[in-house]
Amino acid sequence: MRTTLSRRRLLGSLTAGGFAGLAGCAASGSDDASFTIVPTLDPTGSGDSWDSWGGMTPYWTRVVEPLVWGTDDMQPEPWLATDWTATDETTWVFDLREGVTFHNGEEMTADDVVHSFEENILTERGDFVYGWLHLEPGSVTKIDDYAVEFENTEPFSGFPGTIAHNMIDIQPPEADRQAGDIVGTGPFTLEEMTDGQSLRVERFADYWGGEPEPAELTFRAAEDETTRTDLLESGEVDIVFDPAKSRLSSLRDRDDIALESRQSSGSTFVSINIYREPTDDADLRRALNRAVSQPEIVETVLEGIGEPARGPISTVIDWAADDELPAYERDRDAARDLVAQSSYDGEELTCLVENDMDDGRDVVQILQSDFEAIGVDVDVEVLENAAIQDRTERGEFHLEVGGSQSNSPAADYIMWENFHTMGISNKDLYEAEGTGLHNLGGEVDELIERGFQSSDPEEKRESYVDAQRRIVEEAVVVPLFYREYTVAADAALEGFDLPPIDRLVEWRELTGS
Amino acid sequence: MSESNGALEAGVRRRYRSIRDSRTVATVLSNPLNVAGAVIVATVTAAAVVGPTVAPYEPASQDLANRLQGPSLAHPFGTDQLGRDVFSRLLYGARLSLGIAVVVTAIRLVLGTTIGLVAGYAGGWVDEFLMRLVDVQLAFPGLILALVIAGVLGPSLRNVMIALAVVGWASYARLVRGSVLSTKEREFVRAAQLMGVSWPRIAVRHLLPNVAGPVVVLATLNVGTVILGTAGLSFIGLGAQPPTPEWGTMLSAGRHHLRDAWWIVNAPGVAIMLTVLGFNLLGDGLRDVLDPKQEANLERST
């Protein structure tokens, strides 16, 4: 009898404990919900690029915020600034949102915006920012507590959309950012960070956009796609970006995991050095274009995640061209004829690819085989980023498998930096040797300048489309595919959408059921 | 003509009988593990020599329509993510892996033996200087140093060979020096010195044959280590460039398909494992007969 009672008690306790446990699990939708997310880059540091945030990535974590955000159709959206006006060709006035509180409890004012731009962005990060934002130190001034004026170095209609970027964030002067004391305005506060492993953020109850749902988010480091996929499958994490493509079909078969893909603002193409023999011959470049089948690459290596491309700019960007561009469909006979009439005499072309590039090794080997089929030999060099940069800066290559990606809704700089003679890719060699890498110069430079400066969307699009047409006609690139990114998550999760820029995903409404 | 043929035949017969009756060979063959090692090494060597001529496909030949196909009659070890025949790539890879291992080991052997011989025979400050060099080299973890060298030189198989050759010679130098120090005091060396024989001749004719046994053992064990080192460096992208069918590169490319196409990783993985095992077993067997007093494994892992 005594034994029976104790068993009942034991069973009762276990049942109660079980219910309590289930309640705990089910609490993911309640006040103490926490989730673990694995982005594609290590969130606690990636070389020197995140030193300005003490090693914390400003992407994905939603601790810091810019003045402007991006919409799903890649347009600038009011955020810490509620409105902006161009008062003349180069001057912008931004009205700031009132009642925005920093994580230290202070209200955000124009002084913080001026400090962030002048000290943190323009002075600290240096030259490359001037060319990117078309601002120079001393060009940001306070009008009143809630209005700031920006003076661009030249007419730049894409300015609001360009500063809609996680790295153009607003922090108060008190924040000792490089020591990891991040004081943002975002829906989450940085709580702890273990270098190379993970960082944890907590809900900021006074967030100007309303109290976020999740109490805590952990961002875990796993740059290897197979590791990310294993973490999700084992239930250790809730959300992973870009799981291994080879595992997509098995993930799709699982009821407890949901997969979603979205075309991103990125595009992958082969950039051709048009100032080095023999790729200075447009016939050879056109032959290379005719050797490749973009749909085959997408269907095989990419497992269908991506769109075959005709041009170098992702079509989520409003002025990107695709249908308007000439199509080089695979035709090996025509390609061989073009090779025969070109100046190519059998030498080996050098093709660079970055070792970190997803699927880069497979893509480059398909290209190598395609080019070999039309009689063009290619030597592949898989190098790390710094080595690639060194080689491209000196112009010592023929082909580079790379691409472009915009992390802000305005993507004008992609055209400028890649294809304008004074863009970052071409400028040094142009100034030193009168050449460059991928810049046709002349009419294309003028078209890019017109698109860059025009505030009329139609005129901007027309100019950029014309420039892209000339670039594709002259075969400066071999377009491969417009990128898509995939998010795999616990099927019970709700409350997050995928924008074209994956770094702008919002977690504020993330719930567990 | 027929007389000379007869003499040759007799010579070959004599040689065969002497090998057949040799106690050394009998000792080696008495242990089944040694036989297994010898068989594996012989098989891999045969694959390296004739593999590329009998391989059913070109190693870089792609067939995207037939990617990730499992083992079948047409493709005994399946196809990889680009539709290439894994078996053919494995055969071509054997020549590469074995070739690199033999060349690197030969460089290590020649470099280390020369330095050990000079240090042991010359003595004095030359010995001190060379042995401190050896100490410095042995103080570095081999693979880390090789990784740094390969990283600085840039990714290629040639640079991997340089990196692995640079880090592995010290074990030979130390081994040879020790043997030379004891051998040079022996009477036949002193007699040669008294007869006025030059020191290079003494080194080559009298000292070197007496250190050959342990060196051959170390070299045999070393071949397996070099194969592992090459595969390791290629796995992390510092070695062979696409589409070279190097075993480590194949392993690295296939790891993303471990769940859906296990053969891509397992074929080179098993090949590496068996080859290294074969050389280790053979090395152990040779040690038993050539260097029976040597218990400790002098080799440092790279």
Image: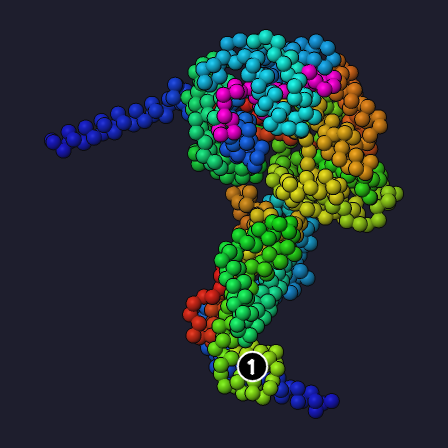
Which of A429 and B129 lies nearest the eye of the viewer? B129
Q: Which residues are magenta?
A: A151-180
Which of A433 and B163 lies nearest the eye of the viewer? A433
Does the stretch in magenta take in A389? no
- Residue located farthest toward the bottom when viewing the structure as drawn: B3
Badge 1 is on which residue? B206
Residue A487 screen position, x and y as percent:
54, 29
Q: Residue at x 52, y 63 (%)?
A: B132
* Residue A342 placement, left or right of A315: right
Above-or-below relation of A284 to A409: below
Is residue A479 visible from the viewing direction of this image?
no
Above-or-below relation of A289 to A408: below
* Residue B23 placement, left or right of B13: left
Residue A193 screen position, x and y as percent:
45, 31
Task: Inspect the image, locate mark 1, and give the three-letter code of the amino acid beneath it.
Answer: His
The answer to which quarter of the image holds residue A461 is: top right
Above-or-below relation of B39 to A328: below
* Residue B249 placement, left or right of A436: left
Q: Residue at x 52, y 59 (%)?
A: B136
The answer to which quarter of the image holds residue A374 is: top right
Residue B73 screen position, x and y as percent:
60, 54
Q: Main secondary structure of the magenta part?
A: loop
Q: Residue at x 26, y 25 (%)?
A: A16
Residue A15 screen position, x and y as percent:
26, 27
The answer to which quarter of the image holds residue A477 is: top right
Does the stretch in magenta take in A157? yes
What subunit carries mark 1? B
- Residue located farthest toward the right when viewing the structure as drawn: A341
Q: Residue at x 68, y 36 (%)?
A: A402
